[in-house]
Amino acid sequence: MKGFTAAIFVFTATMASAASFDLRTAYPSDTAGNPVQVNLGEPFYMTAKFHVDGAPAGPYRLTFALPYMSRTTTDFNYSGDCWATWGPFTDFLDTPTTMKVSIESSGNALADPLTVGISATLPTTGIEYFSPQSLSGSIGASAKLTKGTASGLQWFSPLPITEGFQRVLVAVQQGTKITSTPFSQPAISLSKVESVNMRLVTVASSCRINPSLLRTVTFNSYRSLPSATSTWLRSETLAQSKSSDIGAFVAKSLPRTYKTTMKPYDAVQKLFQAVVAKMQYVVMDKQPDAVTAYRTGKGDCGFFTALFVAACRNIGVPARAVSGFMVGTNQWHVWAEFLVPGYGWIPCDPTYCDSLSPDGSLPLYFGTIPELNQRVATTYGFDHTLSGHAFPRLQSPGVWVTGSTKVSSVQPFCNLAVANGQ
């Protein structure tokens, strides 16, 4: 009986000391709690003001939830008039969305959650680069010889270029500068060495778009393209845009009348979301290609990108893979761009979208990529032929082996850091 009485006593005491909560308001803010207007692709915080009536029976916490991202505060024990600022958050959507604010606790009467409308300010141009950041790093590769000497090795290293989000300040490596076909990718050729290494300094910017402007472009704008641009419509070894499998994927993803009932921007966005919905992220140890991605529904960033690029080209929209790496050590990554005539190349990252909206229901990282200022692009496109040697992929230095020399493996490496303490 003593144990039962003690249990009743504890329960009664908890109920007697339970606090009640009143969530009064919440709004986007800076870190100090001052109200701000949210800008597309830029970080913001959320501030909630609430009242706690009575002494809390235990800790409580606040949760701020967007449809694709939520953050929960540390435990609080305050009473009276309170406020909490938490984040950061990022709005990727050009349409209004909502932030749900709630209080979680045990032993306390909870407040009704609040729903706050979030509507980001869009850029005044179709595509806008912002938040430039200096980056420094290196990229290279080494070959493990099992027979012969380095005299039988010829290296081809991609040479990053200034374009779009990226401005190359320094790219230092010994060798001879050459250009690949068909995409005119600059590269460095160097022979008779077991390893190559290039030092890089770049300025990279984040990216955001204004879809209402991009939607003014129709499919008629793609009928007559310059030869340098129409090259990005051709089928590639890894992006087989003319394959019947890719045609089937497009047919399942778009209505038959898409060229008369949809704008190119919306058709490409639909394909982007279909790729994300189709694919499951799995690390692969082989070359990515669009047909394998379609047939298996599995792959890493290269497979996501290959399927998306092939699908865009299948409907007559120039698209290309962007290969490179991100801040860190050996953080290789592949994403994509598609062309909107009159505006330029629009970056998009189906793999990053998959991490927040794996069912593809939200077009995240479609044109708006805050993390773009933490990347280096080494090559555009998959296929590259250099000095008569074909490389279906040149994300990192490739090597051509001749004579009696034998190589068991080639190990690429990269590293990238924010420069000057930025």
Image (cartoon, rainbow, N blue to C red):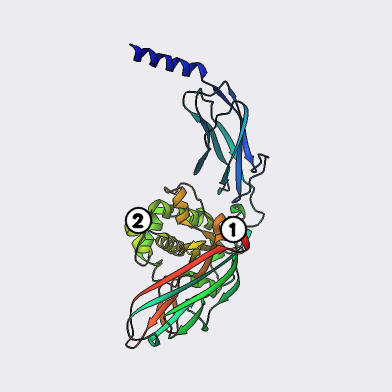
Name the amino acid, label 2.
Gly
Q: CA distance from mark 2 to mark 1?
A: 30 Å
Q: Closest to the observer: 244 or 192?
A: 192
Q: Quadrant of the N terminus?
A: top left
Residue position for label 2? 297
Q: Position of residue 53 (x, y in %)?
A: 58, 21
Q: Earlier in the sequence, mark 2 or mark 1?
A: 1
Q: Closest to the observer: 52 or 176?
A: 52
| Element under disc 1 | strand
Q: Reply above or below: 396 against 367.
A: below
| Element under disc 2 | loop
Q: Residue at x 41, y 79 (%)?
A: 399
Q: Position of residue 151 (x, y in %)?
A: 40, 88
Q: Reply above or below: 317 against 80.
A: below
Q: Position of residue 148 (x, y in %)?
A: 33, 86
Q: Residue at x 57, y 45 (%)?
A: 88
Q: Residue at x 39, y 15 (%)?
A: 6
Characterize the local packing of mark 2: few (<14), some (14-19) or many (20 or more) Cα atoms within 10 angstroms. many
Q: Relative to residue 62, is residue 33 drawn left or right?
A: right
Q: Closest to the observer: 350 or 102?
A: 102
Q: Position of residue 323 (x, y in %)?
A: 48, 67
Task: Residue 125: tell me if it is visible.
Answer: yes
Q: Quadrant of the C terminus?
A: bottom right
Characterize the local packing of mark 1: few (<14), some (14-19) or many (20 or more) Cα atoms within 10 angstroms. many
Name the amino acid, label 1.
Ser
Please identify the residue farthest to the front as the structure is shown: 2
Task: Residue 369: tell me if it is visible.
Answer: no
Image disc number at residue 57: none
Q: Nearer the viewer, mark 2 or mark 1?
A: 1
Q: Quadrant of residue 160?
A: bottom right
Residue position for label 1? 206
